[in-house]
Amino acid sequence: MVDIYELDEQQLREYASSQSQEAEEGYALNDAIEKFEYIESMYQKQRSMFSKIEALLKKKALDDVYDKCYDLAASIDRLSTRIKTFPFEIGEKRSNKQIRLDKLTDERKKLIFSREEGYLKITLPEILPHKQQFDSSSNKIRYYYDIDSWKATYYNQFLKEFENGKYRIFSEKVSICYIMHISPSKKRGVADTDNYDTKVMTDIITTFLLPDDNFLCCNYMVDIVIDEKCIDIDDCYTDIIICPSEIREQVLKNL
């Protein structure tokens, strides 16, 4: 038990700081537990769907079985994504803790780093990874990615690019602009963009270039453009522009 009346001014400040930190950590832990309990409740709710589908099977209501299985698969996919992003939701943002370099498999996918006047341009030889989606017309999963391999492949290249301190940490607020170039023939087959698309790469970028990825440090822009030079899906690529947010419009206009 600490008697604060026996502490000098410096000790009192240190004690107050430690108590404040413990309170913040306690709040963060409680918040994390509540979020995880909610995810668990989602899982329990989905478990009940299996018995409902089994009951429909026994009734030979096969059309209903198909619909319920489709709904269940979509729900499990959303739950899987929620579980994967849970560490980020509770503040575990450091990408190097999420990267498994042992999963590095495809070193043919080369990033191109270009330092332009006032901004950094990174070109990926593919579009960003989408959440897995079930195509009911073909009964197959579309946009499959081994996300651990995907992260490891590009994280390792960032490590090599930055090992000699080629770039500085941005101190001002920046814009991260994702511009995906697709083939005219593939425009109907590209999924809508969402936060999942950019999250993995943003975390890698943050590790090397930003203090954090909160709104004080950066904002985002995502666009898909039809590129006549992209004849097939293998020609599709993504440009990532990282620039001070105050000159974003000027930079994009001059691309």
Image (spheres, rainbow, N blue to C red):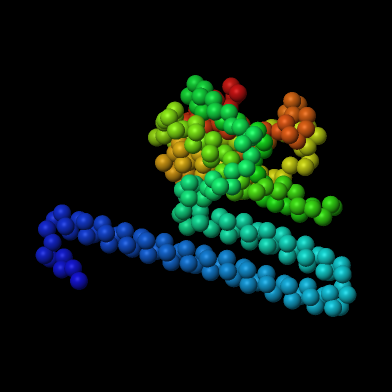
Q: Position of residue 243 (x, y in %)?
A: 50, 30
Side of 138 where 158 appears, left or right: left
The residue drawn where x is 33% and y is 63% is 23
> Going by the image, does 118 lie left or right of 255?
left
Q: Quadrant of the N terminus?
A: bottom left
| Total number of numbered discs in the rendering | 0
Residue 105, picture quadrant: top right
Question: Does 197 sit above or below residue 6?
Answer: above
Q: Residue at x 50, y 31 (%)?
A: 161
Q: Which quadrant of the figure contains the C terminus? A: top right
Residue 51 appears in which quarter of the rendering? Answer: bottom right
In this orientation, does residue 98 appear? yes
Relative to 1, 169 lies left or right: right
Front-most of 37 and 220? 37
Q: Against 113, is 56 above or below? A: below
Residue 58 appears in which quarter of the rendering? bottom right
Q: Which is more toward the observer, 144 or 153?
A: 153
- Examine the rendering and report whether any part of residue 151 can be seen: no
The residue lying at 51 percent from left, 53 percent from top is: 88
Residue visible at 65% across and 44% down in the picture: 129
Q: Position of residue 205 (x, y in %)?
A: 50, 39
Q: Position of residue 74 (x, y in %)?
A: 72, 60
Provide residue 110's location: percent of width, then percent of height.
61, 32
